Image: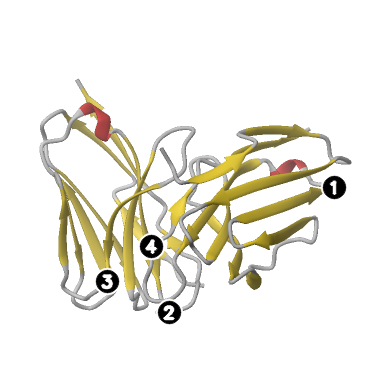
Amino acid sequence: GQQLNQSPQSMFIQEGEDVSMNCTSSSIFNTWLWYKQDPGEGPVLLIALYKAGELTSNGRLTAQFGITRKDSFLNISASIPSDVGIYFCAGRATGGGADGLTFGKGTHLIIQP
Amino acid sequence: DTEVTQTPKHLVMGMTNKKSLKCEQHMGHRAMYWYKQKAKKPPELMFVYSYEKLSINESVPSRFSPECPNSSLLNLHLHALQPEDSALYLCASSQQGGYQPQHFGDGTRLSIL
């Protein structure tokens, strides 16, 4: 099946630093989604991307849908303590209908005081 | 607060028990999903329902039996589970068609004794 390679696996940063993570795939995706999951909760949608080359922001978060449709990145500017959690990229290969998502393995963000 | 509600939040059951997980959404979504998530791993798709009909079964063992009684409800019936089935079970929903993102509930934490 399809696989998403998400990196880095974990990040240890200082509060106020910028964060960057990315996902790559060997196959084309039509939709890229970025989710954040806190302990004991389900994934929460951060940003959805639908067009190759699309750059979308949500507050301090910015994500881009790669031109080749095989990659996406998520940037977080000026990190704060509540940014701690696991960030997942997810892709959907088909358009229309209802299909499940393929998830990356996650980036665990840890902020050091 | 998530708009996808899952009950119970926690469930402990023996291998011979029969129990059900419930999921409810009132966003008018016509696609609903079950995912399984093991600790420190990404969610893995189990089932997809589209317009109350099962459209995708990711080769899930028959001890897991999904049911979609109406457009707002999704159940997962459990019987004769194994210890390796212990996991977080996530329900998600989305608009049907197009490239609609999936919205997740907070999951049911299932432990099999």
Secondary structure of residue under mark 2: loop
Whether tag 2 and tag 3 are in contact, CB under 8 A, the answer is no
Q: Earlier in the sequence, mark 4 or mark 1?
A: 1
Dot 2 corresponds to which residue?
A: A96
Residue B54 screen position, x and y as percent: 66, 71
Q: Residue at x 66, y 46 (%)?
A: B22
Dot 3 corresponds to which residue?
A: A50
Residue B68 screen position, x and y as percent: 68, 61
Dot 4 corresponds to which residue?
A: B101
Q: Residue at x 41, y 37 (%)?
A: B1
Q: Residue at x 42, y 46 (%)?
A: A43
Residue type highlighted by circle 1 = Ala
Q: Is residue A73 above or below residue B18?
A: below
Whether tag 1 and tag 2 are in contact, CB under 8 A, the answer is no
Q: Is disc 1 surrounded by few (<14), some (14 to 19) or many (20+) residues within 10 Å? A: some
Residue type highlighted by circle 3 = Tyr
Please, which chain is the residue tagged with disc 1 on?
Answer: B
